[in-house]
Amino acid sequence: MAEFTKTEGWLDWCADPTPPDFKLPAGAVDAHCHVFGPGDEFPYAPERKYTPCDASKHQLFDLRDFLGFDKNVIVQATCHGADNSAMVDAVRASNGRAKGVATVRPDFTDAQLRELDEAGVRGVRFNFVKRLVDKSPKDDLILVANRIAKMGWHIVLYFEAQDIDEITALIQELPTVVVIDHMGRPDVTKPVDGPEFAKFIKLMDDNEKVWVKATGAERLTVTGPAALNGEHHPYRDVVPFAKALVERFPDRVLWGTDWPHPNLTDHIPDDGLLLDVIPEIATTIDLQVKMLIDNPMRLYWG
Ligand code: 0GY
């Protein structure tokens, strides 16, 4: 049995989230979350950059039910490398209520890809965040892209804001829908209408195939989760960035909890509080239904 000790400073996930004030519409999809292990059943990858605490499929499904989501999109995280077993096991156990995004290397066989597809995988993720991977996955991405395009899958990209020029060029070569994690990780201390975020908006303006996850408030925030002047405005510094994207690209935006919030060292996100960000960024029922139901259903269950 494999024994794993979580990385020093690693914070556990919140075991008793606050009941959210915001009530999700029926059929809502948590379109960005992970499962970790359990490590003794699904060992973490030797090349991983962190060892998380276990976060099992049962714990994910409990959170789904507590928050009022109907479905999950479970995204492969780097701590499991290209061994998708924990994610696939969770998707298979969901009774059709979860889809997956896998890590695929060029040496995967067609039979392996078919098996992932049959399990409920609908996308591949390429992680360009330097602290999470040994080398840029660009070459792998080009080799894998055309193969997964034939299966109707899409590509999820995770990168840092400073790499946007390189990523913008790369996206031109990609044959599928491209979903960008955590809004391209903007520096939220900069103005939302400044030149940095304008680049991200232009990328989406210029490329109809690019979608975005208005997620990651808990990891992009500088002000933290606290309420403002006693009022209930969690993660208020991230809200203008997410709101701008939801309003400009209502048909190409997704939202998810990012549970169990890997690599946070300053606070343990309360997933109930995080949910209360939704009505701040998607301010009408119409926008909420698009972001939480119509868009993820089209991309993952369509
Ligand atoms: C996230 C964010 C992070 C981690 C990973 O695959 C991963 O390990 O994506 C991060 O550290 O920013 O979406 O889970």
Image (spheres, rainbow, N blue to C red):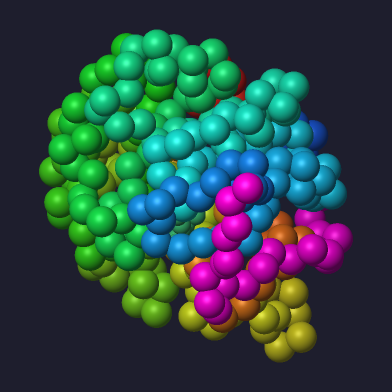
- Give how far across and how far down residue 296 sits, in percent: 57, 31
Report which quarter residue 200 is drawn in: bottom left
- Give how far across and how far down residue 16 sits, in percent: 83, 64
Q: Is residue 143 magenta?
A: no
Q: Main secondary structure of the magenta part?
A: loop
Q: Is residue 21 magenta?
A: yes
Q: Nearer the viewer, residue 142 or 167?
A: 142
Report which quarter residue 268 is drawn in: bottom right
Q: Which residues are magenta?
A: 1-23
Instruction: Identify the residue at the far front of this view.
Output: 1
Q: Tell me: 56 left or right of 298.
A: right
Q: Tell me: 201 left or right of 71.
A: left
Q: Tell me: 53 left or right of 16.
A: left
Residue 285 higher or lower than 152, as above or below:
below
Q: Tell me: 19 left or right of 195.
A: right
Residue 211 higher or lower than 283, as above or below:
above
- Give me the residue at 15% from left, 51% from top: 166
- Give how far across and how far down residue 5 sits, in percent: 58, 66
